[in-house]
Amino acid sequence: MTNIGVYISLLLIFGGLLAILIYSLKGRDVDRRIIFLFVLFSVASAIIFHIEFEESATPIVKKVFEFVENLPPESKILISFDFDPAMKPEVHPMANAFVRHALVKGHKLYLMGLWPQGQALMTETIEYVLKPEFPNAVYGEDYVMLGYKAGNEGVLNVIITDFRKMYSTDAHGTSLDSIPLFDDVKSAKDMDLIFPVGGGKPGPKEWILFVGDPGNVPIAPGLAAVVAPLIYPYYPRQAIGLLGGVKGAAEYESELKKNYKEFENVETPALQMMGPQTMAHIVIMAFIVIGNIGFFRARRRKWQEGN
Amino acid sequence: MIFGKSLYCSFIIIACFFTVATAQNEAVATVDSVGQILPQPPGNIIVADHKYDNGGIIDIAWDRSPDDPLGIDGYNIYRACGDGDFEIVAFVLPGGMESYSFIDDKVERGESYRYKISVISSGGESFSESSVSVRGDWEFFDLDKLNILILGIIVCGSVIGFIFTARAGRKLFIRKISGLEALEEAVGRATEMGRPILFIPGILDMDDVQTLAAITILARVSRIVADYDSKIEMPVSRSLVMTTARETIKNSYLAAGRPDAYYDDMVHYVTDEQFGYVAAVNGIMVRDKPATCLYLGAFFAESLILAETGNYIGAIQIAGTARPGQLPFFVAACDYTLIGEELFAASAYLSGDPKQLGSLKGQDVGKFVAMAAMIIGTLAVTVVSAWQFKFFGWLSDLMYSMFSTN
Amino acid sequence: MGFWEQFGIWLAALFTIGIISFLYKDNVLYKACEAIFVGVSAGYWFVVYYWDMLYKKFYQQVTDPVNPEWYPWLGVILGVLMLTRLSNKIGWLSRWPLAFVVGATAGLYMMVYFVSNAIVQIQGTIVPLAEGTAGDIIANILVAAGTFCGLIYFFFSKEHRGAFGGAAKIGIWFLMITFGASFGYTVMSRMSLMIGRIDFLFGRWLELIP
Amino acid sequence: MKRTIPVIIVSVVGTVLVLSVFFPPVQTMGEDFSLFFDIIAVFAFFLGGGNLVRIHLVKIYRKRPDWGFSVVTLVGFFVTLLVGLGKLSVTGVTASVTAPDSFLQTIFVNIITPLSSTMYALLAFYVASASYRAFRAKNREATILLIAAFIILLGRTPLGMKLTGWIPEWLSILQIPNLAVWIMNAPNLAGQRAILIGVGLGVVAMSLRLILGMDRTYLGSDND
């Protein structure tokens, strides 16, 4: 049913664009209300029928994906939830995609956070992604939730020498000494990869400066779009790659879907969010092209008339 | 063989070192009543009055506790005013550094303070010696800002210098700014068509320099409007801007010799709410169909909403703002755009007054200084970093300190 | 869902459609939305100013039982002078607070802009050009040259002719890239605003989205 | 006298505030100014709000076209004032107008928020129509604008990678998403810097003209 909707709306949009192209080849300008209508219709149909586009990962995202792919099984991966509900739509999908990727490869997961609101979102990930999709994952052996700790960069300063100085227990109050995942882990330096997900302070930048650089731990930040340009300069020396905004998240989700059959039907909120955006972008770009074709056509005609 | 021997020797030396080190540790370690080992206190506490402040800040620095690398919880900072008791003022997490510092900005000017640092670990808390007493003093002049003062004097001096040059009667050349040249024509067009001119001074209040620039331009524009006997309409989103704009337009009409043609409602207040204001201005545009729209001042997301509606009604549009984020939309949708600096220069340009034009020439000197500094500074630091050419070291240091803002 | 919540959704939907209908043309619904928006928001901001400024920053300060301040009174005196506009006879007194505001804004922001715009940006350009990868070096040189030419474009006292004019032209090109890039970059965030509204209309109001 | 005193006030206040930056004992003067400013702004609102009411009353009284909407505006204005100044709420009187149970908050959430976010959302449409019209290769400057915008737009869709994904790794800078990032970081930065430096100097010169009393047409002292 929805498929029919998708086809009909795509047909209408692209057919309409073609008609307008022909119209403007006669050198006439399109009324702006037609443009409005196209933008509205394309966005609305993408929302209603869940139109998604397969994203091909840009190199900067692909580096992260491949890094996880190439880690030996049972590597230790830490994900830090450094965001709040306001930033959630952009970056929570990244955290979820990381969790899926890490567990499907059989890595060990350590979840923590530097933002107080991050803890609830961590629980959400565990309850709605981790437990239903990986029923065999055992708490304490495959993943552990350290939870939120106050102290901002101070926390990082401590865990780079010793986790137990900061976290005597996990989020549920179990002593770290009785959690198998911490048998051979002393500090953040024992991690094989760290995914800080966030966009404020403290956030991925602090992870790079306080843990990645001094401890020589690979860092792959997941960032909100507004701060991504500020972190780009750290790539590729201090960050192995990075995910910027909804687009970065969508690319990662797309890579996961492409490479793992089991994720074909999981929720991909970032890809879904990109759908209407991409539709709108394509429509706008189509109009720019149409406008220029019409413009050149009109100019040539004027030139010919002049002769 | 020799290699083996030296390896052996170094082993012995390291072993000795360790023995001595642990022995020393044992000698100092104190045991508290419960039987746990107390950490060793931090040492070398240095307190000093913070420089170039209002007297309310004291800087504290200390060397880490020898136990710091072995794992501690952190440091407590205690403060005593005069001869009073020590009170805890802050807690600092360990960071693996050799020494720590803390800025206490909660002291009273003129009072003397002593500080004590304690280290906390699982073994307990142990205290350092009390520091010497330091008074929070103020300084009359902020030496950290000396470079800014010098640069400010250079720029302001050249502006004032050229004002005087112009006053002395020397003719100064100023190039044409097309957006401003078009202004008079735009007003003329509105007069011909018998439609009003819409003036939007941005959405910020009088405490923004862009609004201030808009008001100085309004003074010129309303003078032209009064001379042409045209009509100006100015909805505003701030009451204070309304009051100021009324004063300005009234005076322009007075100067044009037509005080009777002025009425207060040329400028009217709409609402402080950003998009409420935009909704109303959009309505005014499509209903009154102004022939010319001027958007000068501080704009945010509304820039494109206004400019597209203005375009739709076929108005000539001239915009100007200093916000780089909104300039693209004005450039895309308006006929002329005053980019950044041009907005602030507009009033002087329109005045045609030689003295004010002189100030524009002075501004150019400022740009020249900036460009010269960029070239010299960039070359100096490049040479120093790429070829370790020490000779230019002083130059790159000078450029860095000249443009540092702490 | 209670009646009032349902009512709120319908009201919001009506407002959303009313504003969007302006895209087609000005109409009664838009006019109504505009009238409500202006009236309600003007009242809202006055209320906020009243409690935040007049009450908190003036009344509470001067009537503080422990440590009453006197200087907020100066602001009130200036404010009352502003009201003299209502009188024709002493209306000229209202220029004093205006002059105060103009002078203070000019004085205060002169240094703020000089430091945070001019000095900080010049400081930003002073970097070693020959550091990092080949790409970094090219980028560094480009940024330095672009800033330089951009500044030349802003020169007022020299005609844009000859080599100077050529540099100014390159300066404009850099400005154009900046404008084009920022425009393109912003499109996405603008789209998400509209997506939010459409989501509301089709999702929460019409409940069409599965 | 009526014109000279304001000019003197501008000069004195301006000069003092410029210099205050350099002298720690008076460095906080700027904060005091913003307090005065806030108080003055509230008083100015009596004039602004009064003007709003007057204009709409006149419109209603003279039965100008669309006078009915003026009634709506006035009703909205006074109801909001009453609710806010009286701190009315479901339970009578609330402690703070920003409390969730206050009627003012209800008005904000149910009326101002949807109106203002829809108004903001109009931007999406205008962005489309503006790019259709403005991004045309009319001359060299416009072409550069068009190309930069188009690359960035492409870089934000899957099309960018689809079109240029084949470019080998050592030339990966030419892949459109990378090119888009590079444009944002290099040439874009240069343009921003030039604008910002110009603005900084422009503000200095304009403030000087005001403080020196050269530009005072806004106070109307050109001719007398």
Image: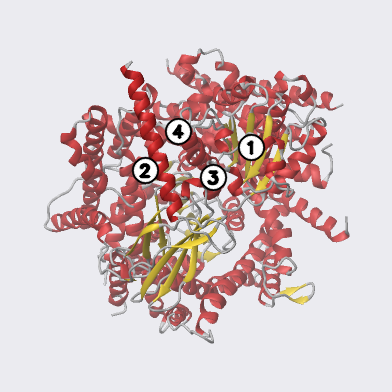
Residue in the image at 23% along x and 53% along y: B151
Residues flagged by tags 4 and 2 on a common chain: no
| Secondary structure found at label 2 | helix
Letter of the chain that mark 3 sits on in the rendering:
A
Amino acid type, label 2: Ile
Residues flagged by tags 2 and 3 on a common chain: no
Amino acid type, label 1: Ile
Earlier residue among tags 1 and 3: 1
Distance between mark 2 and mark 3 Cα atoms: 39 Å
Q: Which residue is mark 2?
A: D195
Q: Which mark is residue B254?
A: none
Letter of the chain that mark 2 sits on in the rendering:
D
Letter of the chain that mark 1 sits on in the rendering:
A
x then y, percent, for residue A67: 59, 23
Q: Which residue is mark 4?
A: A233
Nearer the camera: disc 1 or disc 4: 1
Q: Which residue is mark 3?
A: A156
Earlier residue among tags 1 and 4: 1
Q: Are marks 1 and 3 in contact (CB under 8 Å)?
A: no
Q: Are marks 4 and 2 in contact (CB under 8 Å)?
A: no
Q: Looking at the image, can residue D47 be seen?
A: yes
Residue in the image at 59% along x and 60% along y: B273
